[in-house]
Image (tube, grey):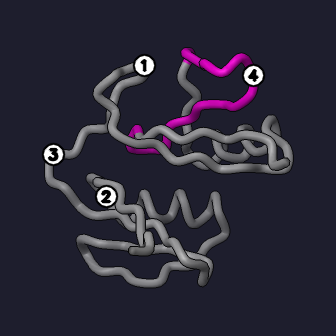
Amino acid sequence: MKLATVILDSADPGKLAEFYRTATGWEVTYSDDDFVFIGDGGAVQLGFQRVEGYEGPGWPDDRKHVHLDFTVPDVAEAAENLLGIGATKPDFQPGEGNWTVLADPEGHLFCISAAS
């Protein structure tokens, strides 16, 4: 078994895919009204599927199911750039400064940490 895609539920898959495409530099590999996929030609891509009435998770909230982790060369610079394209930064920041928790425009949580 090989992981191919992580799919996020979304109210607007095109808009959410554009956020992650801008953030990662990945390209759209498939798109229709209800699904958009992005990738860089590697083994795993991100997908976004329309779910009517979708509402993002709260934070901190034990009901969240999954979050994405990304490494970046400079956490402060990446956070500033991500906030500039629509991410938000929750007040609650666990991890004692080892990573930064952000939320995408639909509320999906993701973390950024320094690349090793």
Image side of residue 64 versus residue 54, left or right: right
Residue 101 percent location from the top left of the image = 59, 31
Disc 4 element: loop
Disc 3 element: loop
In space, the residues marked 1 and 2 are separated at their CA atoms by 23 Å
Seen at 49% across and 74% down, the residue is: 38
Residue under label 4: 97
Mark sitting on residue 53:
3
Image side of residue 113 versus residue 103, left or right: right
In space, the residues marked 4 and 1 are separated at their CA atoms by 16 Å
* Circle 2 crowding by C-alpha within 10 Å: few under 14, some 14–19, many from 20: some
- Above or below, 51 relative to 40: above
Disc 2 element: loop
The kind of residue tagged 3 is: Gly
In space, the residues marked 1 and 3 are separated at their CA atoms by 21 Å
Q: Give the label, 2 or 4, closer to the camera.
A: 4
Residue 85 percent location from the top left of the image = 61, 49
The kind of residue tagged 4 is: Gly
**Reading the chain from its start, which is encountered first: label 2 or label 4?**
2
**Which segment did they paint magenta?**
91-107
Residue 94 percent location from the top left of the image = 60, 18
Residue under label 2: 12
The kind of residue tagged 1 is: Pro
* Circle 4 crowding by C-alpha within 10 Å: few under 14, some 14–19, many from 20: few
Mark sitting on residue 60:
1
**Reading the chain from its start, which is encountered first: label 1 or label 2?**
2
* Circle 1 crowding by C-alpha within 10 Å: few under 14, some 14–19, many from 20: few
Disc 1 element: loop
